[in-house]
Image (cartoon, rainbow, N blue to C red):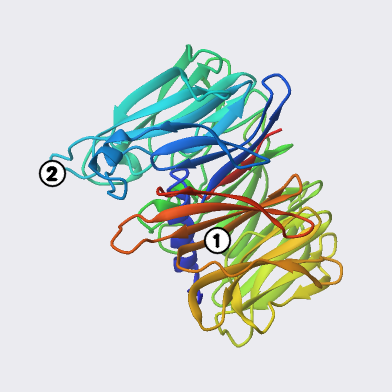
Amino acid sequence: MHRAYGWIRSHLIWVITLSLIVALLLGSGVWFFIRTNAHSVNGVLVTGPAFVALLDRDTGKQIWRHQTNLNSHQAGINTYQPGTAADAPLVSNGLVYVLTQTEHASNGVSYTEATYTLEALNLANGTLQWSWGWKGRSMWKNPPVLADGVVYLSESTLTGNIASPSAYQGFVVALRASDGHQLWKTSLAGLLSPATVADNAIYLSNGKALLALSTGDGHQIWQYQPADGGMSYYSPLALLEGLAPAIIVQSQVYLETRESDYNVLYDLVALNPQTGRMAWRYRSQGILTTPVLAKNTVYVNVQLNQNLSVVALNTGTGAVVWTYRTSFPRLEHPVLDNGVLYLEEELTPPSGTSDVVALQANNGHVLKRYTPPESFEGLSAFTVGQQALYLTVGLLGTPGAEAVIALNPATGAEVWNTLPIPHLSSGLSVIASQNHVYVVAAQTSPGSSTGSSTLIVFQADSGKQLWSYGTSDQMYAMVTQTP
């Protein structure tokens, strides 16, 4: 249960996790909550490295399962064959969009040649409606983005044997969501970031500059290039931070930039979305997390040496509104819910355990501190939702076992807790939605290199277990809700 300190380990864990969904997230679960009157589907969409399946939300019964890597099951259900991955699905208008990858022989070169395919599946029965593919070599795939009936992909392929941004050639393509018809495609040099689409523009980084492209035809509207450094997508950590979705659009365009390859000092920059001109710049003098925006305030975690500050900035001017300081930090994203900012804070002196601290979002005052009960080893994660705070905690004397505790946010009193789930390889992932709490447990079987996963569903107000769904495959750990 003890977690490493320091920004490098934190970033690596974050990146490895994201690389399974964006290439995202190892050993947990991706699930989508779907309600659509037009197609009468009320389900939970579960995805993993070799499958995507739709489950009935009320019973957990499997409605359909689409296998994306038959080779792994031909070789044996617990035998991992590198290749296909059903990454970061999108759901819209009765279709499920999933990105898959099938690797080919490496031929002794860095980064295996692969075929990548965007598949559109029928939400009701899982049948393939259309697909669009390309070939290349890359460390990861960026997830698709859906806006106004169009699916956008920003992808890159390595052109040499050295993984640097200049060795990548990328493209952005717009596909009609209903039938996969290619509307336009444009080539861009560099290692492209995930795209953000807003107000008829596509924003993405190529490692040197932020680019704004027209959603109509892909032509460049403007670019912003930091004068004294690159984008935060690229760092000394073998470029792995390229997976971080650090471009946020809300009245302005907010992005992280880094001062240099080696100083590792991050700034937050706000740009005018029409012109790309800098509105303001916040110099953190440390390491930033991805910003959290709400109304007229943007919140960031800043780590400098062994000190962590949560800083609230005015979105119009960039001025500091308030600062909350602590020591022995974990560089993770704060969670904003109903005017309260929740963050994880290491205990002092560091003991491998943490509290969750609730701050008043408008002034940074501490409202409440939540500490796991003494019978548990410590906090590994937390989730806010359904008028409750859910702590994922370890069990004293039982390594590899975790449980979920539901707390009343106002009083801190325990509402319910689950029985400890043993033999975990990657811990628990929790999401709360529509009066359900979804918990994914990743486990490793004896003699297996991959293990299995189980999705367990609880009633949010009582903690009563409703159903579970087990699979011999891994499940991804990105959670996205759909209307």
- Find residue 306 and report its image quarter: bottom right
Relative image position of residue 16 (x, y in whole percent): 42, 55
Task: Determine whether 370 is above or below 451 in the image.
Answer: below
| Left or right, 402 with reference to 343 | left
Q: Identify which residue is drawn at 40% across, 49% down.
A: 472
Placement of 47 over or under 96, stated as above or below: below
Mark 1 Cα shell of 10 Å, populated few (<14), some (14-19), many (≥20)? many
Image: 106 above or below 356: above
Could you tell me the amino acid type at mark 1? Answer: Leu
Across and down, in percent, residue 61 comes to 58, 39
Q: How many marks?
A: 2
Relative vertical location of residue 447 with respect to residue 436 in this rendering, above or below: below
The amino acid on which the numbered mark 2 sits, given as a three-letter code, is Gly
Mark 2 sits on what residue? 108
- Judged from the image, the secondary structure of the residue bearing numbered disc 2 is loop
* Residue 25 appears left or right of 462: left
**Residue 296, how many percent across, how many down?**
81, 48
Viewer-closest of 204 and 329: 329
